[in-house]
Image: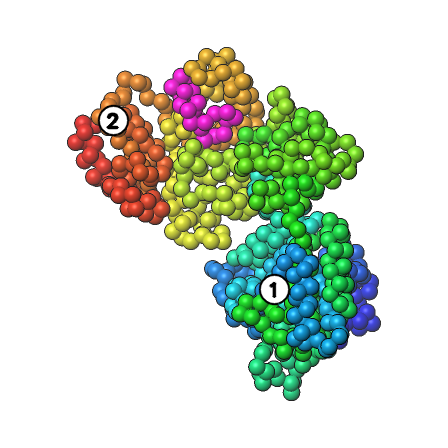
Amino acid sequence: MASASADENPYIEDPPTEFEPVEELSEAEATEQAELLRKAIRYHDHRYYVENDPAVADEAYDALFTRLQDLEAAFDVRTDDSPTRRVGGEPLDELGTVEHVAPMLSIDSSGEADDVREFDARMKREVGEAGEQVEYVCEPKFDGLSVEVVYEDGEYVRAATRGDGQTGEDVTENVRTIGCIPHRLRGDYPDFLAVRGEVYMPEEAFREHNRERVERGDNPFANPRNAAAGSLRQLDPAVTAERPLDCFFFDVLDVRRTGRDSSDSSDESLAASREFDTHWEQHERLPEWGLKVNDRIERTKDIEDAIAYRDRLMDDRADLDYEIDGVVIKVNDLRACERLGTTERAYRWAFAYKFPARAEVTTITDIVVQVGRTGRLTPVALLEPVDVGGVTVSRASLHNPEEIAAMNVNVGDDVRVERAGDVIPYVAEVVEKRAEGHYDFPDRCPVCDSAVEFDGPIAYCTGGLACDAQLRRAIEYYASKDGLDVEGLGGERVDQLLDAGLVADGLADLYDLTDDDLAELDGWGETSAANLVRELADSKHPPLRDFLSAIGIPKVGPATAAALAREFGDIEKIRSADREAFEAVDGIGPKVADQIAEFFDSERNQDAIDDLLDAVGPLETPDETETGEELDGLTFVFTGALSKPRSEMQELVERHGANATGSVSGNTDYLVVGEGAGQTKLDDAEERGVETLDEDAFAELLAERGVR
């Protein structure tokens, strides 16, 4: 199928940025305009992704895309191959599996030139003519995720990961969202085409994506390959669509035209040899069909040229916008490849010449500031991945602004990375200064733009719970075992709530969540939604110490929270106390007293606590005279919906000498089970032989022990 030209499509050469109102069009006019828009968008996608020569500005392209979305929504004229499907389809329950058209095998590899020359000697013996060299095609060995992409009659129909080489995960809807992968082929395409490509995340896009993750408190991806693999395996294609993925194609796995069926071949993995004579011909043909290829692929006359190609590419590695870990050397002659065949796991006609591992000294590609739960700002260096003691490291701590200035470190410098205690990576020193000066630490929070304040060398965001990054971490901590122990509210689910705008204003929004709100989110069902709403309802009357620990006061964990609760008794006395009153509490020193006072002096924090107290009523700390030792030595865990809030049950047993913990362990004596109990705790109890009690049995136990 020939591609659209400017003469036959008004949206190609000089596209408008404004259109007549959609409601003024007839259905026939809308259908015709939508088809012209789809053709124009495909044309511009090809110019941008494949030819690297965009024909229009981003604003003009966006106007075309938005217009197409509007037409498809208003007139229900969306087609299966519409470019608008790149924004993601319906979430999947799970990724299925797909059998590959042809095996997707591995490649033998080595980092030694002698092994490469041995491979060449074998190729000369088995397929070369006496005294002649073997011609090779050399290409970068991309460090991404291999995929098989299949087209029928020029239309994109499916995609799968490499998997075990015979079957892979069905990622059809996710791959559909990648901009450089056409939904429809161009030119003189075959009736059937299966191609192998490598999905990757460009370096610059990877750094920006990691920067965003770190700033909002998420762990960054370790490297671009992990980022690409994780993005491609999302159950929700809309998440994949938001990730900056790209793809290079480099092998034709199968190709068929009418009257030329590959089914008579004993080796379908090399059916392409009947359409092409060489790998190089494939490389030249793929862009004609609209499939993106890499511009660093070369044809070499012998193995020494191939080795030289690898060395040149290794020298240029830092300047490439994609990760590679070596080069692939392939016999160019496809019929020779067919004769060579494969082993059980690898192609015999290809060899990977690997780069040596990067060790300890690497380059800082970016510096980002991570916002912690308490507002502490931590500078993090994002690095070219480097091997440190056998572990690949792609980020390292820069400690604090004073350390940055002392080391005179900045983006672009070569640094030596060490692992503190063989665990936490940090930048030890600048090995070669490549950037001018040191990194200027921001004076505004990178997430909420609040002012940055310093406590000695430590920087803090003053935004408090009004800062999205702190809010995300605050919610996660609020629900943790050191907080109110709300089951079913881990990091990923907190992200979902924030992304959906369900907890935009603070912790108090948690108590407005409904079953219907949650059931609409990806991965939630009626049961999990109801369980979380029940867990939150059960947390509405926590012991004061748990409430104080949960709200994220800097330097205040469970022990300090308990001391405050014992000293002041209720939340309002604590909110009105001054620094001196906090310092008078046993175990609280001057610095911690300052942090507590500053937290409660913050107008933003006070507003957030007011909102939270409208939903939550922390219990006053009981007088010491109300305690006893009837349950001394016992440890209880509570789960599910009980007749009283779980916090009251915990407070009751603790007043009488028992311990109340959030998770089942070998030290647990009883698991008290209410309606809708979490399966994890039930399984843990069974595995450890912990006795389970319903609420009636629990009441009987208390009565037997003399607890009234």
**Left-right relation of 561 to 707:** right
Which kind of residue does numbered mark 1 sit on?
A: Ile
Question: Label 2: how many residues lie within 10 Å, few (<14), some (14-19) or many (20+)?
Answer: some
Tell me the kind of residue under disc 2: Asp
Q: Is residue 29 visible?
A: no
Q: Is residue 697 left or right of residue 219?
A: left
169, above or below 527, in the image: below
Q: Look at the image and tell me whether residue 384 can be seen.
A: yes
Residue 552 inside the magenta-drawn segment? yes
State how many labels appear: 2
Residue topped by disc 1 = 107
Magenta stretch: helix, strand or loop mostly = helix
Reading the image, the residue beneath label 2 is 632
Determine the residue positioned at 75% across, 72% down: 133
x, y percentage for residue 592? 51, 19
The vertical placement of 414 against 542, above or below, is below
Toward the viewer: 189 or 564?
A: 189
The magenta stretch spans which residues? 548-570
